Amino acid sequence: MDFDEVKTLEASIAELFLAMAGPKQDVHTSLGFSATDATRINRQIRLLIDEGRRGVADASLGSANLIFLTLKLLDLQRLIAANKRDHSFLAIEEPEAHLHPHLQRLVYKHLFETIVDGENGTDGDDNRDAAGPLSVILTTHSPHIASVAPLESLLLLRSQSNEGTMGYSTAEADFTKTDTEDLERYLDVTRAEMVFARGVILVEGDAERFLIPAFAKDMDISLDEHGVSVCSVAGTNFQPYVKLLCALGIPFSVITDYDEVDEKPRAYNRALKLIRIIDEAAGGDDTDAVIKAIKDKTTWSETFAEIEKSSIFVNWSTLETELFDGGYAQEMIDTLREHNFSAERKAILDAWEAKPKDFDADELLKMIEQMGKGRFAQRLATRAPGKLVPDYIADAINHVIGLV
């Protein structure tokens, strides 16, 4: 084609599509003519794909949707460049339909980071207050898209009994830079499910993540039916995740270990920090009074009973030792025997089987670490049905179910 304007348009469409979709999913767009009559040529330009071999009508629905988005973005950019728009709103409703998961992330990561931020002039800087010429409002049920959306841009609409629908936004959430970095790394596609949940149970690691659904099933509770997700934070730093859930108005409970050090549990200070976040996010004016009520208790049992009022549930050691001491000794020994331990450790397991009360907590944790906590918990979950659910876990599950 010898028309410079058409060549430029063809190149612009191809470049933007490639930038959004990536080389593996590129459909190789081009422009061609379906008529030879010179008087009709300007009305007969057609967008072709696969290097001119097919028309858009032959494309898949996902590719057709993506081509439409590409053309719409180019049109907006043209109007902005020509100074014909002071500001444009682009509304996209549930764009995940017919798009491969990888394409969902690629396309909308490009949209958020390159087109919107680029047009706003921020280019990833912290200056998010400058109003640019293009704003995007996107509705979605896709964790793939949520996983690449800017953290401060989330707006969650939740139905409230007798109050209609309420909106919750992360725009004013008190995230530190570290919080933001942690959450943006955390909200990959599997954990971005959190923002679509009706309720969330935050846990320390994979062991709880695999076992709690099994415990809930033993309580005749389907977490999926209630829209409750179990999310591991891979540690004990619950603060960023509690801030996120508070900002989005999602009910939750936190399950954490006692972790005794010098006769004082680490869970105590951990809980106080979380309670301050929770109470302040709720607009409470009596945060100090809530903390004082906890500090005034004279026993750890009374203290943690008070802490449970703020959705935080603590055991008396660690999950694994609590289970071993609480009726799961044989099931845990049988699970550990699936691993190829040394003869010495096999003898230890035999001794514990004969006298479960004589088990060594440190040795038990070392064996589980060697087997792998996640694998151990997955295998133990198959042996959990019919067993007694630990009280603090049952309380945490019931607490969330009651809120959703």
Image (cartoon, helix red, strand yellow):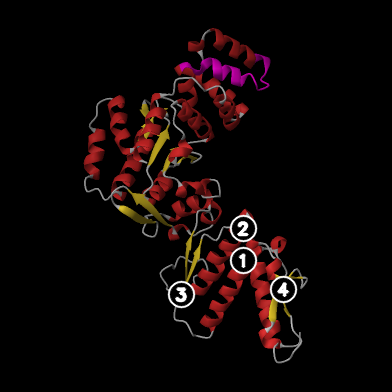
Q: As rendered, which of 264 and 74 lies closer to the eye?
A: 74
SS at badge 4: strand
Q: Does the CB distance between marks 2 and 1 fall below 8 Å?
A: yes
Amino acid at dot 1: Leu
Looking at the rendered structure, the kind of residue marked 2 is Leu
**Residue density around tag 1, few if under 14, some if 14–19, many if 20 or more, within 10 Å:** many
230 or 167, nearer to the observer = 167
How far separated are the C-alphas under marks 1 and 3? 24 Å
Residue at 67% over, 72% down: 15
Q: Amino acid at mark 3?
A: Gly
Distance (Cα) linking label 2 and label 1 = 8 Å
Nearer the N terminus, badge 4 or badge 2? 4
With 234 as the anchor, is 266 left or right in this view?
left
Image quadrant holding the N terminus, namely: bottom right
Give the dominant element type of the magenta stretch: helix, strand or loop: helix
Magenta stretch bounds: 327-344
Asked whether, in this view, residue 340 is left or right of residue 137, the answer is right
- For marks 3 and 4 on the same chain, the one whose residue lies earlier in the sequence: 4
How far is mark 3 from mark 4, CA to CA? 33 Å
Inspect the image, locate mark 4, and give the three-letter code of the amino acid beneath it: Leu
- Of marks 3 and 4, the one in the foreground: 4
Residue 384, compared with residue 132, is above or below; it is above
Q: Which residue is mark 4?
A: 48
Work out how far the residue at label 2 is from the one at label 3, CA to CA, in angstroms.
28 Å
Rounded to the nearest angstrom, the CA distance separating label 1 from label 4 is: 14 Å
Kindly identify which numbered label has been placed on residue 99.
2
| Element carrying mark 2 | loop
Q: Earlier in the sequence, mark 2 or mark 3?
A: 2
> Which residue was labeled with disc 1?
66
Q: Which residue is mark 3?
A: 132
